Amino acid sequence: VDCPRLDLAVELLEQVQDQFASFPPGGRADNGLRSMLMQAYEACPSNATIVDEVGEGLKLLGEKAAAHDLYSEAAKQGIFHHPLQRVLKDFNPHLRSAMLLQKDAWEELPELHEIYTVITSLWKELQVEFFRARKNWKSGYEKITQCQGDARQCWRGWRWAEGVWGHYFVA
C-alpha cells in the first residue's frame, strides 16, 4: 500500500520498539509511547504491517481493547479479513480465511463455540492421525526460531516469545 509517510511511521515504530525491549513481560502503560504509536498509525493507516505493529504495541501498553478496535477498523477497510486474522504477506482479499478462532471471537461469532466444541471432542482422533501421518517419510519438522540458551522467554521485535517455534508438515 502506498504510504508517503512510511519513513516517519517506521522511524517512530523503531523508537518505540527500542523502549519496549526494556519492558517486563506483559508490558505496562506509557502515554509517551502510546502517542508515538498513534502518530505512526496516522502516518500510514492503510498499511497492514504498520497497523499490526501499532496494535501489538497497544497490547504491550495494556490496551487490548484499543488494539482490537484498531484491527476492527482495518478489517472494515479491507486491510485484514478479521481483527483476529491479520495476514501481512501475500494478502488476497478475495481468498477468505478459515482459521479456527478461540474464545476472543465467541462473543462476536457464537457459532465458533459450537465448532470449537465439535473439534475439541475429536482432538484424540486428530492427534492419532497426525502422529500416523508424521511417520510418513515425506513428513517432517522445521525449527523456525527459538530463544537463545536456556532462556524461557526472549524479546522478538515487538513480541515476547517463549520456547521453540516450529512447523510440522505432514504427507
Image (spheres, rainbow, N blue to C red):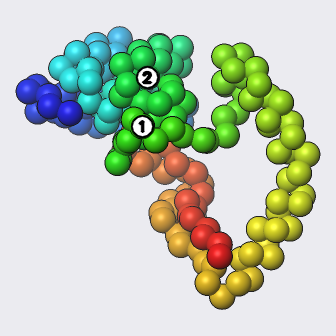
Which x, y percent locates residue 61? 45, 21
Residue that sits furthest to the front in the current view: 94
Look at 53% across and 14% down and name the residue there: 65
Image quadrant containing the N terminus = top left
Which circle's residue, 1 or 2, is located before the other in the chain?
2
Image quadrant containing the C terminus = bottom right
> Would you say 22 lies left or right of 146 here?
left
Q: Nearer the viewer, residue 109 or 52?
A: 109
Q: Badge 2: few (under 14), some or many (20 or more) residues near its Cα, within 10 Å?
A: some
Which residue type does callout 2 highlight? Ala
Q: Which residue in the protein does label 1 denote?
A: 94
Q: Nearer the viewer, residue 43 or 96?
A: 96
Which x, y percent locates residue 105? 66, 24
Relative vertical location of residue 137 with respect to residue 157 in this rendering, above or below: below
Relative vertical location of residue 95 with respect to residue 122 in this rendering, above or below: above
Which x, y percent locates residue 59? 48, 24
- Residue 101: quarter of image: top right
Can you tell which mark lies on residue 75? 2
> Can I make out residue 36 in this image?
no
- Residue 73: quarter of image: top left
Q: Secondary structure at mark 2?
A: helix
Can you tell which mark lies on residue 153? none
> Can I make out residue 108 in this image?
yes
> Would you say 41 lies left or right of 150 here?
left
Which residue type does callout 1 highlight? His
Which x, y percent locates residue 102? 70, 33
Q: Secondary structure at mark 1?
A: loop
Look at 87% across and 40% down and name the residue there: 118
Q: Nearer the viewer, residue 82 or 71?
A: 82
